[in-house]
Amino acid sequence: MNLVKRCGRGRTGGIPVLLAGTLALASTLLGGPATAAPQGTLHELAAAQGKYFGSATDNPELSDAAYAATLGSEFGQITPGNSMKWDTTEPAEGRFDFTKGDVITDFARQHGQTVRGHTLVWHSQLPGWVAALPSSRVEAAMTDHITREATHYRGAVAAWDVVNEPFNEDGTFRTSPFYSAMGSDYIATALRAAHAADPDAKLYLNDYNIEGLGAKSDAMYALASELIDEGVPLDGVGMQAHLAVQYGFPYEMRENMRRFAALGLDVAVTELDVRMQLPADAARTATQSSYYRQVVEACLAVERCVGITAWDYTDKYSWIPNTFPGEGSAGLYDENLSPKPAYAAVRTALGGEDSGGEPGAIKVRYRSGDSSAGDNQIKPGLQVVNTGTTAVSLSEVTVRYWFTGDNGASTYATWCDWSPLGCATVTHRVAAPGSPSAGADHYLEVGFTGGSLAPGASTGEIQLRLSKTDWSDFDESDDYSHGSGTSYGDTPEVTAYVAGDLAWGVEP
Ligand code: XIL
């Protein structure tokens, strides 16, 4: 057994100080930048990776000269926060008003930016007259609205959120005047109408809480697959990404993006912000930076992720305090338009692989909590220890305990029985690797909803348990991660990852 710790990737973080100094000197002599910090605006950095970096904006804010200056220089794409919504563009039936949206597309044109049109069909910010229509008239009203608006913005809008927020949290279709009148067919009808009006615009479905794997993103995935099978014009899926420090980072965001990409769709992060309970403190701010960074890393890791839009770049104009009382500080810039730590984190992440930093230095200690290797439960005890010199954000850490399912059910139940962190902070599930190897056709994956591990600190013991749903017995003796020691020891057969990169151990 090879017990050598394998590092995730070689990065410039490992360059010895002397050599780094020489490189800096060399680049100064050559006339290049003397620092390793990536140059350019957020959008320029993103564009160097084939993506855009954008921001939402709104008409009243554009009279704020300092705000508009940064909006126009730092961002390569803008989305109107309100001015293309139905209540603004068709407040009364057949009375269209595109004045406010035109101000946004003019701004974009003057600053060489692309525009995401937001949004043609949505249950919210919908004028009362639509809801008051008899259901027999809703389809015509919807297609007329789409046709007029998408035709008006032809050439000025690169992509449309054609339908916004079609799903409930459990993945069922959300009730709206459109769903009530047409059932889920309204979505295909809306996409076809938008395509007819502007054949060049990229057409998206957009929703929140679909950033990670889960019931709601499964529903979006099923819908997108069905629409594609039926030949309905659909180009992409927008993940709003209204994240919150207190709810943890979306589960497997890049895997989720990849499955949409595999359907042949583009993916866009359309409304990114990371709110927190106020007051902002150091821990919340650090978690926020880490979430912003992880979103950027996920997008960079998936070729079909076309770009990221912040749902307004500054706390000064964020929608969060009005909608989530007691929460805020969600943006990349503060209320004085000064960049926050999250801004630096995004820049670093956009600077590419070499400036992404080492994966956090961590190790896993394990003991068996199980006196029988042949009964119906597996009971690993785990500890994650920070062996590095900087804090590790636990929301980025996952641990895999590899085992074989043996005979019986292939579905599992998992438990956290005890941890000084509190089991509410610990996530656990069983998954199967793409291809099984000896002693490892499944793994128990453990993660954390948040928190930070200081240099040298340990999570303390996490007592875990799993069984098959039919309670049939395991034979643990051949399991890759299984050991019989009952006191904790460093265990490379239990692997650990930081932001998806192997940071400890040897995979089976
Ligand atoms: C928000 C705007 O930012 C606010 O100004 C407005 O009062 C409410 O809507 N999901 C969406 C966006 O798709 O349209 C919402 O924008 C935020 C949530």
Image (cartoon, helix red, strand yellow):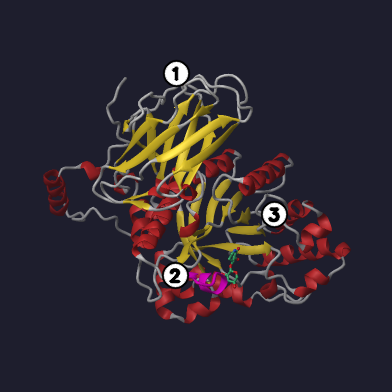
Specify which label sits upstream in the sequence, 3 or 2: 3
Q: Position of residue 196 (x, y in %)?
A: 72, 55
Q: Report the front residue among 208 and 85.
A: 208
Report the Cα–Cα distance between label 1 and label 2.
50 Å
SS for dot 1: helix
Q: Report the front residue among 313 and 28.
A: 313
Determine which residue is flagged by label 3. 195
Horizontal side of residue 403 vs 205, given as left or right: left
Determine which residue is flagged by label 2. 278
In the image, which residues are magenta?
320-329
Look at the image and tell me in which quarter the C terminus lies: top left
Determine which residue is flagged by label 1. 477
Horizontal side of residue 190 vs 241, given as left or right: right
Specify which label sits upstream in the sequence, 1 or 2: 2
Residue drawn 48% across the image and 62% down it: 273
Q: Position of residue 169 (x, y in %)?
A: 65, 54
SS for dot 3: helix
Residue 290 position by quadrant: bottom left
Q: Nearer the viewer, mark 3 or mark 2?
A: 2
Residue drawn 13% across the image and 49% down it: 21
Magenta span has 242? Answer: no
